[in-house]
Image (tube, coloured by chain):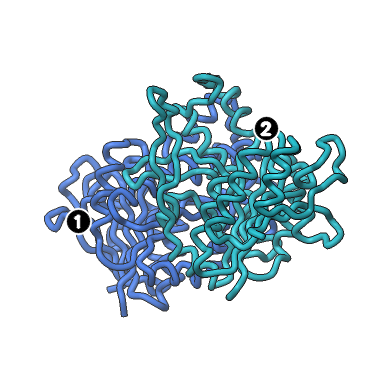
Chain colours: A cyan, B blue
Amino acid sequence: MKTLKVIKIGGNIINDSIALSGFLQQFSTIDGPKILVHGGGKLATKLAKQMQVDVQMIDGRRVTNAETLDIITMVYAGKINKNIIAELQKNKCNSIGFTGADGNTIVAGKRTVKEIDYGFVGDIVNINTAVLELLLNANVTPVFCAITHDEKGQLLNTNADTIASELAIAFAKKFQTELYYCFEKNGVLLDVNNDDSVVEHINHKKYQELLKEGVITDGMLPKLNNCFHAIEKNVDKVCIGKSEMLYNQNSKFTTIQAS
Amino acid sequence: MKTLKVIKIGGNIINDSIALSGFLQQFSTIDGPKILVHGGGKLATKLAKQMQVDVQMIDGRRVTNAETLDIITMVYAGKINKNIIAELQKNKCNSIGFTGADGNTIVAGKRTVKEIDYGFVGDIVNINTAVLELLLNANVTPVFCAITHDEKGQLLNTNADTIASELAIAFAKKFQTELYYCFEKNGVLLDVNNDDSVVEHINHKKYQELLKEGVITDGMLPKLNNCFHAIEKNVDKVCIGKSEMLYNQNSKFTTIQAS
């Protein structure tokens, strides 16, 4: 069985054009089928300010109204995604930019939580792998931004971490699947202030221990729950760390596996 | 040999959400392989004003500076293209949005004319059909916006009419190819003020006659030259008219063929 790497990058790379350029150059050298998923970074907020669009908040959570969705679509699917594609082509990595609407790849349902309407935010209900598989087999790399659709003509804003894990899960039947979350730290740290204190391997048992010991911080909890969800759904391993973990053999990062 | 339809729509449809929605519904019913190419309409100019970006002009022609290219990328490849895709999916037409960077489908060179630098404007130098063919054979419709790239990491603004004709030409070896230019008139008119005065068939000989008679107006000349260029490069026929020509058998339009 071939190995598929699903790699998610976030704001620390997206917001820094030199870091992004360096990452894409290294990403292009990764052999075998791979999918890139990117978040939006600060650009959407910047554009909203420039366009004088107010950010609406309910209970401390951003509401994606129609204007905000337009901005997200322009920035994520337009500016960020297409510049990534152009840069990958420069590095001879043939790639195509995707939202979940493209190829009907990621279908989501609009989120309503009790009385709160978060606007155009979508939770994934289905992933169609056929078109992606066709492209992966033709050595083309799909690059996803954090937008899905509802099959009724509506684009929806969806968390990029979730898109990455759900893609990895959907492909777990066809490939040996590895999920990589690149962020600004070396992984799960025993001491948040010490980037060398990486927990290199976590399985279910170890996770319970770390939780008891209070090592897992609030920010890390949803990320790790996401990871274990993927593991339970037959993703072979999930790695968390700096993007260097993808190509630098000496870098430290956290690997999460079932056992 | 299968027939491929390459269909270009412009501002009169893009700027009118009801017209666009109706068009996409009809477009979805067209059998067989098809490619949609769309222009940008007025939205880019509107966003530029909102962002207070000045439009730079040299000799009456717009210069695409870095800021303008960003706006075009956001509006064309983001907002317009992705909403078209979502709407096509609603109508069960599986489709994927493309710039020329995606799949390395359209390679262009940055235009420099004598001393004038038009900025990030690209003239097409090569079209790679392999990925598109793969998708067309899988019943997926590529939807192109008016952006290409130079294979060196730079996105470029390219005329949508030219993208449509060059795509049709590139596919003429593999398919029987038909090119449709949808615009606000019923085609080439003998009397510009009478939408019923359509010249239904034009070949080389007829074209020379019409030119002599002064029937071809200034605005129509580059469009028709584009059409005859496609015909000379083995595109089977080019049709110009309102989008109704695609699905209403009673509509009048102009068909251009070699003889």
| Residue A160 in sight | yes
Name the residue at the bottom extreme: B1
Q: Quadrant of the N terminus of chain A?
A: bottom right
Name the residue at the left extreme: B250
Chain under disc 1:
B
Residue at (59, 29) in percent of width and height: A47
- Secondary structure, mark 1, is loop
Residue at (48, 38) in percent of width and height: A157
Q: Position of residue B78 (x, y in %)?
A: 50, 43
Q: Mark 2: which amino acid? A: Asp
Residue at (18, 43) in percent of width and height: B194
Q: Which residue is mark 1?
A: B247
Classify residue B92 by image quadrant.
bottom left
Q: Position of residue A199 (x, y in %)?
A: 79, 49
Q: Which residue is mark 2?
A: A218
Q: Position of residue B42 (x, y in %)?
A: 43, 35
Q: Nearer the viewer, residue A79 or B241?
A: A79
Q: Mark 1: which amino acid? A: Tyr
